[in-house]
Image: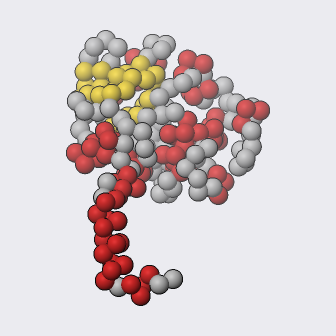
Amino acid sequence: MEKFVAFEGLVAPLDRANVDTDAIIPKQFLKSIRRSGFGPNLFDEWRYLDVGQPGQDCRERPKNPAFVLNQPRYQGARILLARDNFGCGSSREHAPWALEGYGFRVLIAPSFADIFFNNSFKNGLLPIALGGAELDALFAQCEVTPGYALRVDLAAQTITRPDGHTIAFTVDPFRKECLLNGWDDIGLTLRHADEIHAYEERRKQESPWMFAA
């Protein structure tokens, strides 16, 4: 998993509440259990005017010009603003895979569904819970400022606007450490590779019949 330290990126405003995981990545794309390749189908039913299917070349599909991610000014966005209860619905891990595959690293919303929130951290995304006037100001500034970008410093736990205003956010210390070091669940386990190897060698000596095959 890619390390997350300090990051600056273009912002896209998705001014909707209760965006569920079926909207983030529709059910027909769940046939694949690979973690890659879902970016073109992020928000598929909103981005395109036809019904998408797995394996389809999205470059040839008709796009919905009214959807925010299809507007030229938001191409290459890495930070997504949203409203309450983002990621609600089913617990599909494909949702953060699709967001990460599109290019997003940071999600900012007043609240997130619990399972989606946990899955985001495990897949290298930083979901930041931010509400009230601070979030409203980000939406307002983004919508009137082409090229609107934010700097997110995970180590300092701050968001810096283009005008220099700094917003503090909270994050669980363990999740923060994992993102800073690029540790997913496998990475956390591999930190103990020497101990695991030593245990396996000891078991072979203590119970050789278990390893006869």
Relative to the observer, which residue lies in front, 40 or 167?
Answer: 40
Q: Tell me where residue 184 appears, x and y as whole percent.
A: 39, 50
Furthest-right residue in this view: 60
Identify the residue at image location x=63%, y=38%. Answer: 40
Instruction: Please provide percent x and percent y for residue 11.
Output: 45, 24
Q: Is residue 63 left or right of residue 174?
A: right
Residue 66 in view here: yes
Q: Position of residue 100 (x, y in %)?
A: 50, 39
Q: Residue 157: which quarter of the image?
A: top left
Q: Residue 29 at what x, y percent from top left?
A: 64, 51
Question: Which residue is more in the foreground, 106 or 182?
Answer: 182
Relative horizontal placement of residue 85, taking residue 102 as reference (left or right) = left
Q: In which quarter of the image is the N terminus?
A: top left
Colouring style:
secondary structure
Which one is nearer the viewer's eye here, 12 or 8? 8
In this rendering, the answer to whether 55 lies above or below 198 is: above
Q: Point out the residue furthest to the bottom here.
A: 209
The residue shown at (47%, 84%) is 212
Q: Which residue is drawn at 31% across and 46% down?
A: 178
Residue 67 position by quadrant: top right
**Residue 162 quadrant:** top left
40 lies above or below 183: above
Give the residue drawn at x 66%, y 25%.
65
Question: Where is 25 relative to 209, above or below?
Answer: above
- Report the label total: 0
Say whether residue 13 is visible.
no
Q: In this view of the protein, which residue sits in the foreground, 71 or 39?
A: 39
